[in-house]
Structures are given as C-alpha cells and as structure tokens.
Image: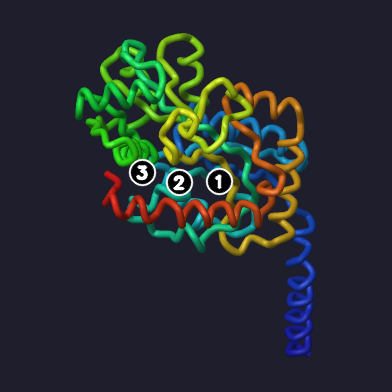
Amino acid sequence: MQKLIIVAALALCAGAAGVLAPAHADNFPSHTITLIVPFPPGGSTDVAARIMADRMGSILGQTVIVGNVGGAGGSIGVGRVARAAPDGYTIDIGQWDTHVGSIIYNLDYDLQTDFTPIGLISNNPQLLVAKKAMPADDLKTLVEWMKAHPGDAKFVNQNAAAQVSGLLLQKLTGTQVLFIPYRGAGPAMTDLISGQVDLLVGQGAVTLPQVRAGAIKAIVNMSPQRSVSIPDIPTSDEAGVPGLYMSGWFGFFAPKGTPKEVIGKLNAAMVQALAEPAVRGRFADLGLDVAPREQQTPDGLAAFHKAEIEKWWPIIKAAGIRGE
C-alpha cells in the first residue's frame, strides 16, 4: 500500500509539472518584471527605459521596475541578464555599447548566443559636437581646421563608440586627433561646455539640450540619413565625409532560452507602447527615432544585431581597442 501511495504521488507530481510548465508561459506575467539598465541613473538609456517600463507595465498588468546596474561599460548589468532565469522576468535595454562594443572587455558571456532578442526600440542619432569656441561650424570647415592643426583636436574618449568614431574620423579625413579619456559623457560634456576639450560624440539625448541652449555646436549627425527628431542637422554624407557613421540604438533582450510565448507577450507590449503618440513624442524630445515596425520584431532585432556585429567587430579588433 505504501509503495502504491508513493507511486501515485509521483505520478501526480509529474502530471502537475506537465500542466504547470506551459501554464507558466500562458500566465505570464504573474509578478514584477525587472528591466536592467546597465548604466547609472539619469542618462539617456535610463530615461528611455523608464518611459518604456511605465507604459509596458500598464499594458502587461504588472509592474516593470528599472534596475540600474552600472560598471565596465555596461557589461556588468548585461552579464546579470545573461545569468538570469530564462522566464522573462529579467530583461535588459541593450545598445551598441553593451551588445556590440563591449567586445572590448573580457566577458564571461557570449553576446551572440546568450540572449534572446525581444525587439528594436529606437535608432538613436549620434552627434559629433564641438565646443562653442571651435573655429568651425560644420564638418567641412572642421576637417580643414584639423588638417591645419594636426593632433590639436582634443577628442573625448568616454567609451568604445566614441573611440571608434574618432578612429573613423581620422581614417576618412586624413586627420589626427588627441584622445582624452573620460569615465562618462556627463563629466566630458561639462568640460566640453567649459572649452577644456574640443570634440565629443554622443547620443542626441545627451547632446541636444546643450546644442539647443547654445552652449556647444552641432557639427554633424553621424547617421546614413537625417533624423526624424532632429531634421535640421545634416548627415556626414551630406557634409562631405561619406561613411562617417556611428550606430546608436536601443533594444530589449532576454536571457537565452526564454519561451517564445513570453517573448511574444513582451514584444507585443513593447510594440503597443511605441505606437502611442505620447511615447513617440517623448522619444522625439530626446532625439530618438522609433525603430521601423519590421525591426521591432524579435527576428528584426536579431538580424539588426547580427549585422551590427559583423560590421563593427572587425573594425574594433583591427584597431586593437581594449576596455580599461
């Protein structure tokens, strides 16, 4: 009798497990979701994440809290997501620096295989800006000044994206810059405004407020086409230096192995939020262009991310860039 009871109990548990496993995805989300921002509070990534977390939480019927986990160019926070349970309750807002440029660090996870894409959120124009006293107002005159003053241009190097941008500028224009290392865009912007450095590359969310205030100059938009949110700033192609691009974008990623049904629900909430005029308006104020609808899908982000890696990793490796 005792053996029969044990066998029956085991069978009941097995049956319950079979029922509960798919129900977990069906009932998602049943509790709070954590959205990891791999940088300190206050930056453009943090602001965009909080906009999306607020709307997606309402859509999903569960709170989406933002957790800021900074350090090592964002790789510490992204690593936390890579090691999280693949259940959809821990995701991150990734970007070029964290999911492409972080190859410069010794990572304990694989950027290509340890994450499941949810969807591309935005394309973020990167602006090359200059101190107000710079004797150049556009890319053409800047290049002329740099050629007349080789090595004099103090170029902010606050992350991999900035360093790659400077290297591309040198290569495409036959000029030379002096890289000045910084721990973040905030301190660098302070020194650019005061005139201690000459050039900085950063997202519109960081640079536009100071440009609009007249504290610094916008030299060029380092994108293949003009931005919907900042249409008055010309591209590098238009300014005479074709190919001077630096990618900026935001996308949601989950741990590898997260169920498709869960990814589908997260994606649906993301897409719905991005379609709302209020969200699109706030993104425009930040200088962020909402991603095309076809790239908002998991497959769209997967293809986009793959193309970014294939484009930038050879450049980074050839330049020998390593994280400090």
Q: Can residue 41 be spotted in the picture?
A: no
State whether residue 168 is above or below residue 202: below
What residue is rendered at 59% in x and 42% in y? Answer: 35
What residue is rendered at 40% in x and 14% in y? Answer: 216
N-term mark: 1 or 3: 3
What residue is rendered at 53% in x and 57% in y? Answer: 306
State whether residue 69 is above or below residue 266: above
N-term mark: 3 or 2: 3
Marks 3 and 2: which is nearer the front? 2
Label 2: few (<14), some (14–19) or many (≥20) C-alpha neighbours in 10 Å: many
Q: CA distance from mark 1 to mark 2?
A: 10 Å
Q: Which corner quadrant holds the C terminus?
A: top left
Label 1: few (<14), some (14–19) or many (≥20) C-alpha neighbours in 10 Å: many
Label 3: few (<14), some (14–19) or many (≥20) C-alpha neighbours in 10 Å: some
Q: Can residue 127 be spotted in the picture?
A: yes
Q: Nearer the viewer, residue 154 or 98?
A: 154
Q: CA distance from mark 1 to mark 3?
A: 16 Å
What residue is rendered at 41% in x and 27% in y? Answer: 128
Q: Nearer the viewer, residue 49 or 307?
A: 307
**Quarter occupied by residue 269:** top right
Q: Amino acid at mark 3?
A: Ala
Q: Which mark is residue 72?
A: 3
Q: Which corner quadrant holds the N terminus?
A: bottom right
Location of residue 316 in the rendering, given as x and y in whole percent from the top left corner: 34, 50
Q: Nearer the viewer, residue 299 or 146?
A: 146
Q: Nearer the viewer, residue 76 or 95?
A: 95
Q: Which mark is residue 92?
A: 1
Marks 1 and 2: which is nearer the front? 2
Q: Which mark is residue 98?
A: 2
Q: Amino acid at mark 2?
A: Thr
